[in-house]
Image: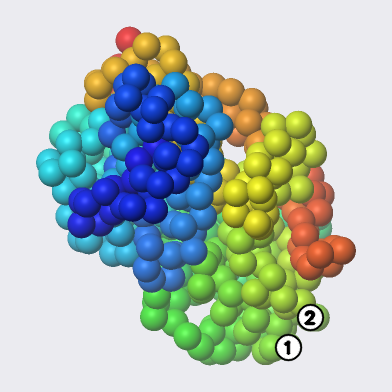
Amino acid sequence: MTRINKTSKFAIKGALAALALGLSAQGALAEKVKVGLLLPYSGVYAALGNDIQAGFELGLETFGKEYDFVIANEDTEVKPPQGLAKARKLILQYKVDVMAGIVSSGVLGAVRDLVDGAKVPLIVANAGNDDATGAKCSPYITRMSFSNAQVNRPMGKWLAEQGVKKVFTLAPDYAAGRQMIDAFTASFTAAGGEIVGQEYTPFRKTQDFGPYLAKAKASGAEAVFVFYAGGEAISFVKQYDSFGLKKDIPLYGSGFLTSSLYVNAEGPAAEGVITSLHYVPTLDNPENKAFVEAFKAKTGRLPSEFSAHGYDAARALVEALNTGARGREGIANALRSVSFTGPRGETSIDPATGNIVQPIYVYETVAGENGLTQKVLASLPVEADPANGCAMPAPK
Ligand code: PHB
């Protein structure tokens, strides 16, 4: 594997790492596959981008030894116009065979038409934007992460079944926040629950959640349900506790809120928070055990859902290449039929939408021997997302 840095010079570190792994000798024989990684390396989601990259590289090292991957990284920050400019650069300047990454639903929305029009395969390694595998789906977009509705829809029903009837919701005001809360709200109210208040906080700009927490407190809610991720999740969880709300109104959310990537930065404030997600590092299956060990050996820390997206995105690419698929068109087509048992359990791509089909887990953040950990409370049924207006020809 060779990494090309942002100025398109060969990164010395990457070249040395490739030599150390013996990949350069092999690389002379192996076929080159040019991969463009579009990730945030700065801004509120920077830690997520770095974790996805670590997982992606591990996935290529684990599954893709026969290929010589040349990787170009571009920083999308968390800004749609920046993401679009960087995607264009990867396609036109680096002439990549395939792109992977994208953390923010806003960035995914911005690059969708470019990807579809340029016919370059994109493996989404985070952004849950429902439209990208719904009304705005494309044969060139395959998602190995989750959709915003998929993670939150089962949680609305589950929470109502626990006897919680009145909920106040909060999320950042952008596509992901709105879609996650919409999916939760639809299933929670269908199961007899009531939303007693709903607020959206300015994305990337809210430092003080106090005014919103005051509204939640006054709302008569029995529980608060939120989506926050990255730096915003850390601030929110800490403020929820220091505001004194946690002991009176239990906190629920989509599981990015208490991701293993940063839950220890949240500290005791995160204890007892119950959320839903498609991956936690405590899942008890052999594929996950192997992933956790290999990730720890590589990085010195536990993986998160973000590293799992990267790892599975790399594996999906390798599986597509293993079918003999080559070039942008061939890889895009083969990606639509990928399926394997990975760290999250049974994982497959729905050829009708390009979205992943996978189990969703409810987990509680609890104190463990080495800091906070994830106790799985329930495994919810695997459900493919509805087509939501997606109409594509079947893969060839
Ligand atoms: C998104 O914008 O789609 C998004 C970002 C961060 C997450 C989850 C979803 O943790």
Name which residue type carries label 2: Asp
| The N terminus, quarter of image | top left
Mark 1 against mark 2, which lies toward the viewer? Answer: 1
Q: Secondary structure at mark 2?
A: loop
Q: Is residue 286 left or right of residue 115?
A: right
Q: Residue at x 63, y 31 (%)?
A: 342
Mark number displayed over residue 248: 2
Residue depicted at x 66% and y 48%: 297
In the rendered structure, the answer to whether residue 41 lies left or right of residue 339 reads: left
Residue found at x 50% / y 30%: 315
Whether the residue carrying mark 1 lies under 8 Å from ligand 1 is answered with: no
Q: Is residue 278 visible?
A: yes
- The part of the image, by quadrant, that contains residue 341 is top right
Q: Amino acid at mark 1?
A: Gly
Q: Quick check: 285 above or below 110?
A: above
Q: Which residue is mark 1?
A: 244
Q: CA distance from mark 1 to mark 2?
A: 8 Å
Q: Position of residue 27 (x, y in %)?
A: 36, 27
